[in-house]
Image: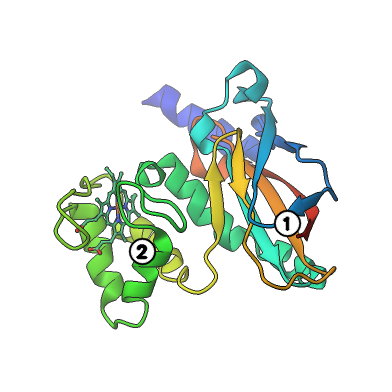
Amino acid sequence: MGIFLLYLISFTAHGQSVSENNAPIVEIIKPKANKKLKCNSLVPYSISVKDVEDGNSAYEEIANFEIILLSKYLEDSSLATEYLENINKDLEPLFAMSKSTCLSCHAATHKLIGPSFDMISKRYNDQENAKTYLVEKVIAGGSGIWGEVPMLPHPGLSKQEVGFLIDWILSQADNPTQFYIGGAGAFKTKEVQTISNKSVYILTAAYEDHGISDDSKSKKHGTHSIKLMIGK
Ligand code: HEC
């Protein structure tokens, strides 16, 4: 007990300077910035993550399912600044879900084992008690609403943690955030009828590290965003 107290006191006295967690360095290797993409096509991507504490994705030291790519279509490139200023609204819930189990069963706009986030949002976003119901359902698990396949229970998550995720899921009806998991893969560009020369795609690669001793307050994230042109 004495030693423990001593440790506490010295830790508090030194504060953050004892050992500061380094932020990860994230880079989109492929595609190259400003490349022109074709609409309705598959675009291969790859991401590099380097973190002093967690490791280097080149040596498979980074958990692949914790690397996130967001792809956002904007009709006018002048909207990019505002979009990027608010990107944490999408990244925070996605980081939390990538560290839980959710993203192995749920995707942005297509059904995996469970319904997509835009389908869930369209079904519930105008219902008054949806949030309370969905928080309880995620914690307890269950089946029968979307089909016979059950969602596993998540007893380790608090109502507050799940509530934060549900708020975001319920906001995904109209302009869902397209996200992809993993350091390499392909994303699909939209089918658009009329493309002006102002239309762009913004790609953002992101990784949140594990901080020091998994202390959530010391976690840091790294992001890298690039702009791509889009044409027929
Ligand atoms: C093992 C796969 C699996 C995992 C992991 C999973 N889900 Fe689900 N989820 C499902 C299935 C299947 C359904 C459909 C259940 C039904 O039909 O009642 C579902 C339904 C939902 C619904 C809608 C519930 C309803 O009654 O309409 C929400 C919201 C949801 N999941 C969120 C989450 C969140 C958040 C996580 C992570 C904490 C998560 N899910 C993890 C498979 C999963």
Q: Residues within 10 Å of mark 1 (few under 14, many from 20)?
A: many
Q: Is mark 2 within 8 Å of ligand 1?
A: no
The kind of secondary structure element at disc 1 is strand
Which is nearer the N-term, disc 2 or disc 1? 2
Q: Is residue 146 left or right of residue 26?
A: left
The secondary element bearing badge 2 is classed as: helix
The residue type indicated by label 2 comes to Gly
**Quarter occupied by residue 40:** bottom right
Give the Cα distance between marks 2 and 1. 28 Å
Q: Residue at x 50, y 43 (%)?
A: 216
Between 89 and 142, the one lying in front of the other is 142
Residue for badge 2: 163
Q: Residue at x 65, y 39 (%)?
A: 16
Q: On the picture, is 38 further left or further right than 90?
A: right
Image location of residue 105, percent across then percent down: 34, 45
Image quarter in which the N terminus is found:
top left
Task: Give the percent coordinates (x, y) of residue 21.
Answer: 65, 34
Question: In the image, what residue occupies the spot 38% across and 70% down?
Answer: 121
Residue 160: horizontal and vertical position, in percent?
35, 61
- Quick one: 127 or 190, which is closer to the camera? 190
Circle on res. 202: 1
174 and 13: which one is in front?
Answer: 174
Q: Residue 17: in sight, yes or no?
A: no
Whether residue 133 is visible: yes
Going by the numbered disc 1, the residue's amino acid type is Ile
- Does residue 120 appear left or right of residue 16 in this picture? left
Q: Position of residue 157 (x, y in %)?
A: 30, 49
Number of residues whose C-alpha sits closer than 10 Å to that of mark 2, classed few (under 14), some (14–19) or many (20 or more): some
